[in-house]
């Protein structure tokens, strides 16, 4: 019933529907023909249903071990646990493209469902742009990476999945990350639609911001999840490799962060319109080229599991059409957008502009560092690589002013502000930061980590103070403050929480620079000392697993003689793939991670010795916790009434729609 | 505040930030870029001792020696590109995919006694070869990808270009275990 052929047919149907979705509503909007425009939502939902059917067929083939499907035969096996049979569907190139298309379909249908209060022409154009992009991807999927291709004769068993991918963290990492990437297609579609219409106003800013914030939340979580995966699966003790694949997700995150800030200025002050449209185009272009340059093998990387230069031509063509086309449209139409309201350099707008400039400089640095090596090897045949020292030396100095301004930006009033009253209100945060700086000087080494930690304290304290100030905490009875807090728009809380989350992440990153580690080769029974803990290797055993055999060590960790935890780091050998993986053991108390890795077995059979790597990672969980807090802040501001309801009709471009924030 | 003065402020801020970014990048490019070198390049002219480089090649079969200094495990192995071999010294756990006769990239500095690696990278599957290593092999004339998989690293140092061609002509793609297809 749910045969791969049906899936293939559904995919082809989705491609046809997407093509219609990309053309008809545009014509309808141009001719102001309501009936044609009203086709858009139906086509978007139809495309989503077709894609869902295709996806269900592929999942069904994976779950029922249909090895006559080439994709399943190459990536699955009978012995694989059910969860990984399902998640393995998007663990390979073909399946991940299908997932990508599916999420794009969800975005189109979501605009159709939640965009009822948009003007019909704008909605039709937005859905049409999403449909056109989707048509490109579905064509790519059908022509160069068909997930439903059959293989004959069908093998008895599949070849299995890369053992590194057999992990719950990685199973859910791609859908979340992809939702982030693809989600920025909606602001992109809004930008293109606005360029076609030649009009961007406050209402446009209000409509586009929730989509951008939602995509940003997913991207934030996706990046954090990826970094966490590399921390606990790859077992090298680090969390970020500055690898092209990781940078490919960081670059759109930086421009996306700039976008959600500049869209506020469009919404509140009708300024920075052209810039915001450009940011929306850039963010989606970066997420598009990021994923696909990686997938095409142009950027060589440890993460690129699916490298196939043959697909590169199609991808480059698609990127050229999407990015080149939208930039050409931008160049042609942007001058038609009218300039917006005036503001002084010291004002909320000024601070947001500064935020944008700094984020874009950071983005430029990361982009250059990522693209320079491939260009060098392409143009000069010189193989070089750019790693942590380069990115540390370039990004940290640019991030420091960003953290400083982040503290008082949200407190500045719109239009024109005085710096002094704001600084007066922030004296407590400044004091706390100064105290933190003094304290950290004793506990940490290196000026940059100390400075960054102090700035993290500054950012967190300023966010809390901002909220306290707004509810007049301790200036009036608590019940009055509570009342004020309830009246406060949720986006204010969202901002404060997201900014505090950035502070938490910076604290984690800075503390991780103080991590200690030790590599030893010891016989059973030895005790090692690291960071005030005694790590004793008490036993090593061989244990069988479902499709591997494991060497499992038992590590007893004591602090002042009291047992803290017993760890079982292990090393797995997968029979079918002739591969070994390292299973890290991590014990966390939220303030520090104890991280144990078991290496090779050496020595004689009578007196074996084992290589152990022990890490003490202070505040490591805070890096990901901070990202989670950021995403929570974003979600909270999404639930703000002002964002949800939107304006039922367009404000006149000339009207001044300043709302007291 | 007129439009003109606002634009002036904007331009100043942009120039300041992007200028700072460019300056930081140029500085980092001159000191923090890591070049890829092959063992024969190292043999011809060793990079300065304070310069981090990536040394790539194949691990010579039978060259891996492990020892301990105190409790610290130390591994020594030779990395070759078929023309010259460099001894690498590494303190730490070799990656799971490290094998004799397979490709490896060592990050570190060239010291008097040999190459001291701070990091050793081996890639995900056993048939994979880093692009740089494959390029170096092709340049040395010992492997032509059109005629099958790369020759076994055991033979590289003794093998000449003529041998490589002979080996390919007589035994096809025998030297390496056939790909297991993952």
Image (cartoon, coloured by chain):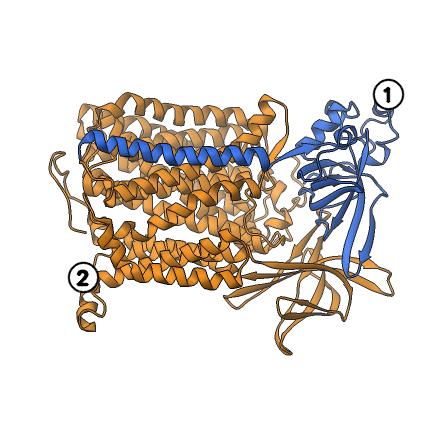
Chain colours: A orange, B blue
Question: Vertical placement of A114 versus B42: above or below?
Answer: below
Marks 2 and 1, how far apart at CA: 84 Å
At horizontal 53% and vertical 28% (from top left) the residue drawn is A144
Subunit of label 2: A
Of residues A435 and A197, the one nearer the viewer is A435
Question: Vertical placement of A503 versus A561: above or below?
Answer: above
- Is residue A113 found left or right of A397 in the rendered image? left
Percent of width and height locating residue A320? 43, 24
Subunit of label 1: B
Structural crowding at the residue carrying mark 2, measured as other residues with C-alpha within 10 Å and reported as few (<14), some (14–19) or many (≥20): few
Picture quadrant where residue A497 is located: bottom left
At horizontal 20% and vertical 37% (from top left) the residue drawn is A270
Picture quadrant where residue A182 is located: top left
According to the picture, the residue beneath numbered tag 1 turns out to be B162
Percent of width and height locating residue A81? 59, 55
At horizontal 65% and vertical 44% (from top left) the residue drawn is A158
- Is residue B86 found left or right of A564 in the rendered image? right
The answer to whether one can see residue A31 in this image is: yes
Mark 1: which secondary structure? helix
Q: Are marks 2 and 1 in one subunit?
A: no
Mark 2: which secondary structure? helix
Of residues B37 and A43, the one nearer the viewer is B37
According to the picture, the residue beneath numbered tag 2 turns out to be A487
Percent of width and height locating residue A179? 41, 45
Structural crowding at the residue carrying mark 1, measured as other residues with C-alpha within 10 Å and reported as few (<14), some (14–19) or many (≥20): few
Question: Vertical placement of A631 versus A590: above or below?
Answer: above
The answer to whether one can see residue A67 in this image is: no
Which one is closest to the eye, mark 2 or mark 1?
2
Percent of width and height locating residue A405? 33, 48
Pointers 2 and 1 in contact (CB under 8 A)? Answer: no
At horizontal 35% and vertical 62% (from top left) the residue drawn is A431
């Amino acid at each position: 019933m749910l045969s791969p052929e049906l899936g293939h047919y559904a995919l082809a149907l989705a491609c046809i529907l997407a093509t219609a979705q990309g053309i008809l509503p545009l014509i309808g909007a141009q001719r102001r023909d309501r009936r044609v425009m009203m086709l858009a939502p139906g086509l978007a939902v139809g495309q989503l249903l077709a894609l869902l059917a295709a996806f269900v067929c592929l999942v069904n083939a994976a779950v029922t071990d249909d090895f006559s499907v080439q994709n399943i035969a190459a990536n699955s096996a009978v012995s694989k646990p059910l969860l990984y049979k399902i998640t393995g569907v998007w663990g390979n190139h073909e399946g991940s493209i299908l997932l990508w298309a599916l999420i794009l379909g969800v975005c189109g249908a979501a605009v159709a469902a939640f965009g009822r209060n948009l003007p019909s022409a704008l909605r039709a154009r937005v859905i049409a742009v999403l449909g056109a992009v989707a048509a490109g991807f579905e064509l790519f999927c059908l022509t160069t990476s068909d997930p439903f291709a059959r293989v004959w004769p069908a093998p008895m068993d599949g070849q299995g999945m890369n053992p590194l991918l057999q992990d719950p963290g990685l199973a859910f990492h791609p859908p979340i990350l992809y939702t982030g990437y693809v989600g920025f297609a909606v602001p992109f579609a809004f930008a293109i639609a606005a360029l076609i219409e030649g009009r961007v106003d406050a209402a446009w800013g209000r409509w586009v911001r929730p989509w951008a914030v939602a995509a940003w939340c997913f991207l934030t979580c996706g990046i954090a999840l990826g970094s966490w995966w590399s921390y606990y699966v790859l077992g090298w003790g680090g969390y970020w490799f500055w690898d092209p694949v990781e940078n490919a997700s960081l670059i759109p995150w930086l421009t996306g962060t700039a976008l959600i800030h500049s869209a506020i200025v469009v919404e509140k002050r009708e300024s920075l319109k052209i810039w915001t449209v450009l940011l929306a185009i850039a963010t989606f272009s970066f997420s598009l080229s990021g994923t696909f340059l990686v997938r095409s093998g142009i950027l060589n990387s440890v993460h690129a599991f699916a490298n196939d230069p043959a697909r590169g031509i199609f991808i480059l063509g698609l990127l050229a059409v999407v990015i080149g086309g939208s930039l050409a449209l931008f160049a042609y139409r942007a001058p038609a957008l009218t300039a917006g309201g005036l503001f002084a350099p010291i004002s909320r707008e000024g601070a947001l502009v500064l935020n944008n400039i700094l984020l874009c400089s950071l983005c430029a640095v990361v982009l250059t560092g990522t693209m320079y090596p491939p260009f060098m090897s392409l143009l000069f045949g010189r193989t070089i690589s750019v790693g942590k020292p380069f990115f540390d030396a370039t990004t940290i100095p640019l991030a420091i002013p960003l953290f400083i301004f982040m503290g008082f930006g949200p407190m500045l009033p719109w239009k024109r502000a005085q710096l002094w009253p704001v600084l007066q209100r922030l004296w407590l945060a400044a004091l706390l930061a100064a105290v933190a700086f003094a304290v950290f000087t004793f506990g940490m080494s290196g000026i940059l980590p100390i400075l960054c930690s102090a700035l993290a304290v500054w950012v967190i304290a300023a966010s809390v103070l901002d909220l306290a100030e707004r509810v007049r905490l301790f200036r009036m009875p608590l019940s009055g403050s509570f009342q004020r807090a309830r009246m406060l728009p949720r986006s204010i809380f969202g901002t404060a929480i997201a900014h505090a989350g950035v502070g938490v992440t910076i604290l984690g990153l800075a503390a991780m620079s103080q991590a200690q580690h030790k590599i030893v080769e010891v016989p059973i029974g030895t005790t090692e000392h690291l960071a005030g803990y005694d790590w004793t290797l008490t036993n090593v055993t061989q244990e069988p697993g479902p499709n591997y055999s494991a060497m499992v060590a038992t590590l007893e960790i004591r602090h002042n003689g009291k047992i803290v935890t017993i760890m079982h780091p292990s090393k797995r050998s997968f029979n079918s793939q002739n591969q070994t993986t390292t299973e890290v053991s991590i014990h966390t108390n939220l303030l520090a991670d104890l991280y144990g890795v078991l290496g090779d077995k050496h020595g004689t059979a009578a007196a074996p010795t084992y290589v152990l790597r022990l890490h003490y990672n202070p505040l490591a969980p805070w890096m990901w916790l901070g990202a989670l807090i950021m995403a929570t802040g974003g979600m909270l501001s999404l639930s703000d009434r002002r964002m949800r309801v939107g304006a039922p009709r367009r404000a006149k471009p000339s009207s001044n729609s300043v709302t007291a924030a | 505040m007129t439009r003109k003065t606002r634009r002036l402020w904007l331009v100043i801020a942009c120039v300041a930030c992007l200028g700072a970014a460019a300056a930081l990048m140029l500085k980092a490019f001159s000191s923090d870029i890591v070049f890829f070198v092959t063992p024969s390049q190292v043999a011809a002219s060793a990079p300065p001792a304070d310069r981090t480089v990536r040394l790539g090649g194949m691990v010579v079969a039978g060259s891996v020696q492990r020892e301990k200094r105190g409790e610290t495990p130390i591994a020594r192995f030779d990395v070759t590109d078929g023309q010259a071999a460099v001894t690498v010294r590494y303190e730490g756990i070799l990656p799971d995919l490290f094998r004799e006769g397979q490709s490896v990239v060592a990050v570190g500095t060239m010291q008097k006694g040999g190459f001291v690696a701070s990091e050793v990278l081996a890639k995900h599957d056993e048939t994979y070869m880093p692009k740089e290593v494959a390029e170096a092999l092709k340049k040395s004339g010992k492997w032509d990808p059109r005629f099958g998989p790369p020759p076994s690293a055991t033979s590289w140092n003794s093998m000449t270009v003529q041998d490589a061609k002979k080996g390919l002509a007589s035994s096809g793609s025998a030297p390496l275990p056939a790909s297991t297809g993952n």
